[in-house]
Image (cartoon, grey):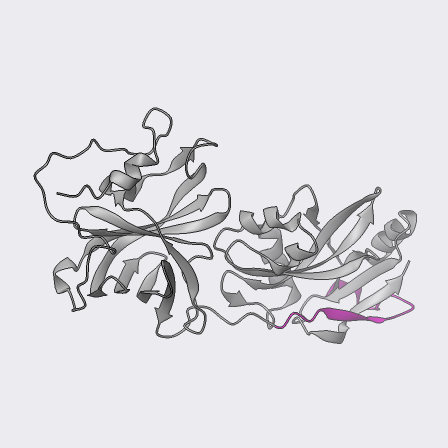
Amino acid sequence: MSDKLSKYRSKRDPNRTPEPVPDTPSPDGSADGSVDGSVDGSVDGSVDGRAFVIQEHHARSLHWDLRLERDGVLVSWAVPKGLPADPDTNHLAVHTEDHPMEYLTFHGEIPQGEYGGGTMTVWDTGTYETEKWSDREVKVVLRGERASGRFVLFRTRGKNWMIHRMGAPVRDPFPPLTPMLPTDRTRPPKDVSAYAFEFAWGGRRLLVPIDGGRTDAARDHPWLRGLAESFGSRTAVLDGEVATLGGAELLVFYDLLYDDGHSLLTEPYTTRRAALEALNLTGPHWQTAPSWPGESDAVRRAAREQGLPGVIAKRLNSPYEPGPSKSWLFVPS
């Protein structure tokens, strides 16, 4: 018989990696049932309830590995941006070598310098049903805790594959990347208890969309790649500005427009602020800006002492309103 795991073994040394590396099989066994060797275009109900796993793999570049049990192995694809949440957007899926069944539960640190070196965790696991399986198209229904629904993997040109979600989107659309802007005031509002007060940093405004562990903002700010990767599969749109503090650039975040598949535009400032603080955004080039509800005079005085241009008063019950808004007030220090 053909050894379906020969390519897998050729890339791994069991003495150097914690990954499962089964022994070479004996000559007797079943035929190859992998994607490349199967040309079965019919519906295959005999594999209903077989296992799948999706692993989050922080290797040279972040990606997710989708593995489907079939004929004694895990047929595998690397999906750089994870499973698509919207049927209008297909994601690249790179067909890789078959993996052993023991990989269903594998997680750990693959040493740097080894094939796939980096941290691997189990992102989701469950069972799946097969609707079609051929050498050019695999249509399945995933039944996991985080990944569920109908997906089709299809071959394009050469060895390239894409993955498509069938059915309705499973998350809100991303909001427009238009920042909310304050209105200028010469004095703080009279009802200070209705506002939170933050420093006006005097920097460059920056909205940071994060999807699939990546952000377009990294094109101008490469150091944001680390922040985006730390989000894993969690989607977000962060609002802040790049300020120069102590001679170094620092991105200070002070609002959250979108979080984990849900738009927060209509939520009050207090809800968005709590969600932002729960992210614990602290890194070498970014941090969460402080906020002081009801503290007008002290914050304004501190801004003046630190040479900042002023403070922003943000109404506690205000939604996020892209463009100029009277719910945010700039007051000079």
Q: Name the one closer to the observer, 180 or 188.
A: 180
Which quadrant, please, contains the N terminus?
Answer: top left
Q: Which residues are magenta?
A: 176-194
Eyeballing the image, is 18 above or below 268? above
**Residue 124: image location, x then y, percent:** 35, 51
Residue occupying the point 44% across, 31% down: 111
Residue occupying the point 42% across, 47% down: 56
Q: Is residue 210 visible?
A: yes
Eyeballing the image, is 211 above or below 164? above
Task: Pick out the residue farthest to the top.
Answer: 15
Q: Is residue 289 visible?
A: no
Task: Pick out the residue farthest to the front.
Answer: 158
**In the image: residue 19, left or right of residue 71:** right
Location of residue 191 (image quadrant)? bottom right
**Residue 273: image location, x then y, percent:** 64, 59
**In the image: residue 219, left or right of residue 182:** left
Residue occupying the point 38% across, 26% down: 16
Q: Name the one closer to the observer, 165 or 303.
A: 165
**In the image: residue 203, left or right of residue 126:** right
**Residue 232: image location, x then y, percent:** 49, 51
**In the image: residue 244, left or right of residue 1:** right
Which quadrant, please, contains the C terminus?
Answer: bottom right
**Residue 27: image location, x then y, percent:** 10, 36
Residue occupying the point 78% across, 47% down: 249
Q: Name the one closer to the observer, 262 or 31.
A: 31
